[in-house]
Amino acid sequence: MEVLFGSSENPDGVYQYLPDSGDGAILITTRSKDVALGVGGEMVILSEMKVEEATNLLTKTLVDKRLVKDERGVTSLLKQLTYLPLAITQVGAYINRNRVLIAKYVELLTGTEQDVVSLMSREFHVSTRYRGSRNAVATSWPVSFHEIQKSDAAAIKLSLFLSCIKPKAIPQSILPSLTSEEAMVKAIGTLDGYVFLVRRGDTDIFDMHSLVHLATRIWIGRNALMPQAERDAIQHMAAIFPSVSYENWNQWRVYLPHALRLLRGKETVAMEESYDLYFDVGLCMREDGRIKEAVTCFEKCYHWRQDHLPSNDPAKLRPQRELASAYGMNGEIKEAVLLLEEVVKIQEETILKHHLDRLLSLHSPAVVY
């Protein structure tokens, strides 16, 4: 925007010098919806390429046209590239240079995140792009992040959170709060304007292209923001994760994949909020019939609290009781009974005779047996 229209510090944007005549036309291409709206005139929004269009582009890019005969491989490749022209061109250049089959490239794309980052960061020559332009997917998008950072700090805050969760089926209610509702509308509008977030119809559910999500993580990592982003995201998710009840079934089912993705972060290991979230996720898993996964979550919460809380702390005893219950449901009766007997013993010493937690613990061994 500053290049075109200037700023308060430098008002001389180039837009005022563009000719305005009926004898010709100027075509301006941009990723920014604000720029497109600012220059006015007729606006053409390019939608996602269709499969046939993407296949034709890949075919033109490849030296060995026979490679596209692998229809299954081509379909899988284009889907993973989200039919993005720059990504398709980059893949074609890589295949031409390294003489690999399409199936091999698909295999590389489904490898570790570091492998994908390496693939998407490789620069290549394209005669149709401006000299000095970044041509790799992972290095071209950071230009947009830089522009967003200058104009909408709230959108960057959302991007930091979005980089830590799953890129699909993102409910607006899961996003960290901003200073006002108007700030949220503006921030989402900014990300939508750059097609970083795509709304599903008239709903409050959003998606990010997987490559946009990857580019976001790369940009955040290269700016040393990932550790703090993961810590902030865990604290936020632990605070807002819905209670596991029938009334909240639809909500926690939508939140669950994002919580699981968050718990994979490197910065989550030493945070108390991570183990609060493991406990809530364990309840969801058990409710969903995923007992082994519930056991894993409860174990993580139980062991962390064993090491960090007093033996009679209620915050420690509840995960112990829930872990015992999960052990029982998983057929690990001996382990379940040992844990429950310990809970009963501690509560006999510390909790009033008719306290609900004590009654629950006394009832639990009978259920296990």
Image: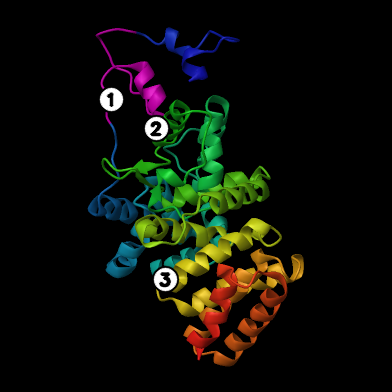
- In the drawing, does residue 74 fall left or right of residue 364? left
User: Residue 53, image x and y in percent?
Assistant: 25, 50
Calculate the distance from the C-alpha at mark 3 to the C-alpha at mark 1: 50 Å
Label 2 packing within 10 angstroms: few (<14), some (14-19), many (20+): some
Q: Label 3, on which residue?
A: 287
Q: Is residue 5 above or below residue 57?
A: above
Q: Label 1, on which residue?
A: 43
- What is the span of residues highlighted in magenta in the rendered image? 20-44
Q: Label 2, on which residue?
A: 193
User: Residue 272, image x and y in percent?
Assistant: 68, 58
Q: Earlier in the sequence, mark 3 or mark 1?
A: 1
The residue that appears at 39% across and 54% down in the rendered structure is: 251
Of discs 2 and 1, which sits in the foreground? 2
- Residue type at mark 1: give it: Met
Q: Is residue 136 above or below residue 356?
A: above
**Residue 342 in sight from this viewpoint:** yes
Which element is circle 3 on? helix
